[in-house]
Image: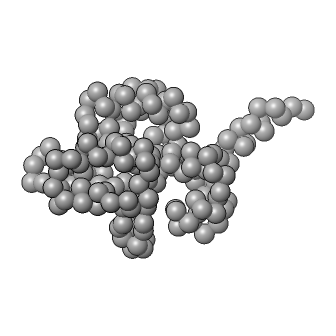
Amino acid sequence: MNFVQPIRDLEKIEDIKRFLKQRSERNYMLFVVGINTGLRISDILQLKAGDVREMHIILKEKKTKKRKWIRITPSLRRELNPYIEDMKDHEYLFTSRQGDSKPIGRNMAYKILREAAQHHKLRDIGTHTLRKTFGYHFYLQNKNVAMLMDIFNHSEESITLRYIGVNQDVLDKAMSTFKI
């Protein structure tokens, strides 16, 4: 399994949003939902319009089987409302173009993100980058690792900090000023 990184640069995130929006509203929304909820791609792809009409996304996580409530942020709500306006509650948010009212698969989600990453010369990007990007920026804004541990269902602070790449940032900073 390849190790993926969060997207740390807010300007790069905005560039990717513009890139994806120019190509496909669906692909843009996949990215926006991912970086604003912290959900795993397996849970994102199963979302239906009815799941995002209220204040919270309520779901049973595919990996952990735990029930999860995620508050839809005001900025995500502004993006979601026009996107789901004409959708029926039972329709998947990220429908495959292959027909049969099925969601896109993990491989397609990966291809979407890889194309955006390559265009913006980013390395170590995959579907998990969305979750890690959420975690990284959530931590920078709140500095509350305990809350983030709860969101991610992690058992230790060190796991969460390593997961979102904060430990790497600290190491990089220390090494940049180290000398003998």
Q: Is 156 situated left or right of 95 in this image?
A: right
In percent of width and height, residue 160 lies at 61, 58
Which residue is rendered at x = 64% and y = 58% of the image?
Answer: 145
- What colouring does the structure picture have? one colour
Q: Is 84 situated left or right of 136 in this image?
A: left
In percent of width and height, residue 7 lies at 51, 38
Q: Is 132 situated left or right of 109 in this image?
A: right
Which residue is rendered at x = 36% and y = 43% of the image?
Answer: 78
In percent of width and height, residue 92 lies at 21, 55
In percent of width and height, residue 71 lies at 44, 59
Q: Eyeballing the image, is 62 above or below 31? A: below
**Quarter of the rendering occupied by the C terminus:** top right
- Visible residue check, residue 118: no
Which residue is rendered at x = 55% and y = 33% of the image?
Answer: 9
Q: Is 151 situated left or right of 88 in this image?
A: right
Q: Number of labelled discs?
A: 0
Residue lying at the far right of the rendered structure: 180
Foreground: 177 or 153?
A: 153
Which residue is rendered at x = 64% and y = 63% of the image?
Answer: 146
Foreground: 91 or 162?
A: 91
- Visible residue check, residue 73: yes
